[in-house]
Amino acid sequence: MDADVRIAIDGFNLAMPHGTGVATYGRALGDAITGLGARLDGVFGIPVGANPDLREILFYEAMGRGIPDDPGLPAVRAVRQWFARYRRAKVFDVPTRGLIVQDMLERRLPQFDRIMSSARLFERADRYFVRTGRFLTIRVANPPDIMHWTYPVPIRMLGTRNVYTLHDLVPLKLPYATLDRKRLYYRMIQAIVRDADHVCTVSESSRGDVIAQFGIAGDRITNTYQSVSTTQPRDDRLGDITAVFGLKPKGYFLYYGAIEPKKNVGRLIEAYLGSQVAAQSAKLAGGGNAIAAGLGDYERLRMQQEFLSKRYDAASAAFEAARQQAVRQQLYVVRIVDANMPVRSEYPKRALSLLTLFIALMVLYGLGWLVAAGVREHAS
């Protein structure tokens, strides 16, 4: 690839302190771009300020400690956000002078040739999309040849080709497994499919889902598959894994990711129990690690699972019955004390009311007398 070609990726997930699977995708994409000889730019949403001397410091502070909260009282922040609606998003270049020790962040960020950042860019774009239904347009000096958004975000860069990666349609395929706002998510995917210069995805299944649900042409969406980049030779770690965990090569499954419903971790565990990968090199029967040796334990676990599942269903039914009974009992109105006359009334306070009225009348009388006296004196 020509070294003059510049490709930018967003830092929406790269800036998260704990990272995500999308952050891993972004790092691998950045390594692939630089590996092809192209120049790599990064677009972040970190507040770096207008002072060029502080931008690099503030950028790496946020990368290490997380993006700071918007300062000020809630009312002040609300007013600031309201005025920000009518201001263009400013994108600042972050100078990379090599003054910051980046050893702790080396594995989190690819090697950028240029870093750009706009304060809370992604939050602002989300609010703008909620309010208007349109993507936030950003302008940068000397834009890259391609802007690759590694996650579905409602942003487009002016003066370049905008490419978006749709990793999956889990919020629409499994709506009960995520907390996304489904209407907004659906409209955003619709806009991406309609307006993007190209769409990428990471599996044939996801590609088929996008084509089937949104009708995108097959030549406008490409499956790049999911990948990772490793800088350390694989053999250097094999001995450590065996020594620390007692795991041999090809003898285990490795799950790396968040524990959440959409990850389907339960089926992965079932696959592990069903495959018995540690015994695949052994005989079908016989030996401590063979499949037959583990079938008894597996069946015992299955029986325990069914038994506990039934107990859970019974407990749930009992809980629901008790809850409905409590609701019914709350509907009864029981008279505790009969209504009667008070022993002594506190209000109105008659003496205080009469005194207040007397003083008010005396004041009015005095004012009237003074006015009459002044009129008589003026007439004489």
Image (cartoon, rainbow, N blue to C red):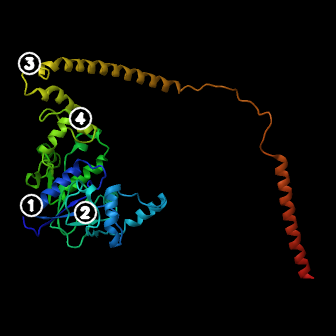
| Numbered tag placed on residue 43 in the rendering | 2
- Give residue 62's position: percent from left, percent from top: 34, 59
Say how many tags the image has.
4
- The amino acid type of the residue labelled 1 equals Leu
Between circles 2 and 1, the one closer to the viewer is 1
Q: What residue sits right under mark 1 in the picture? A: 36
Closer to the observer: label 1 or label 3? Answer: 3
- Could you tell me which residue is drawn at 14 percent across and 53 percent down? 200
Give the foreground label among 3 and 4. Answer: 3
> As shown in the figure, which amino acid type bears the numbered disc 2?
Val
Mark 3 vs mark 2: which is more N-terminal?
Answer: 2
Quarter in which the C terminus is drawn: bottom right
The residue indicated by pointer 3 is: 285
Residue shown at 88%/67% (left/top)?
Answer: 366
Rendered view: 114 above or below 266: below
Q: Nearer the viewer, residue 155 or 286?
A: 286
Q: Quadrant of the N terminus?
A: bottom left
Upstream in sequence: badge 4 or badge 1: 1
Three-letter amino acid code of the residue under disc 4: Val
Nearer-N-terminus badge (3/4) = 4
Q: Which mark is residue 265?
A: 4
Q: CA distance from mark 3 to mark 4?
A: 28 Å
Q: Is residue 319 left or right of residue 209?
A: right
Between discs 2 and 1, the one toward the N terminus: 1
Q: Check whether the beta carbons of the residues at disc 4 and disc 1 lie within 8 A of each other.
A: no
Under circle 4, the secondary element is: helix
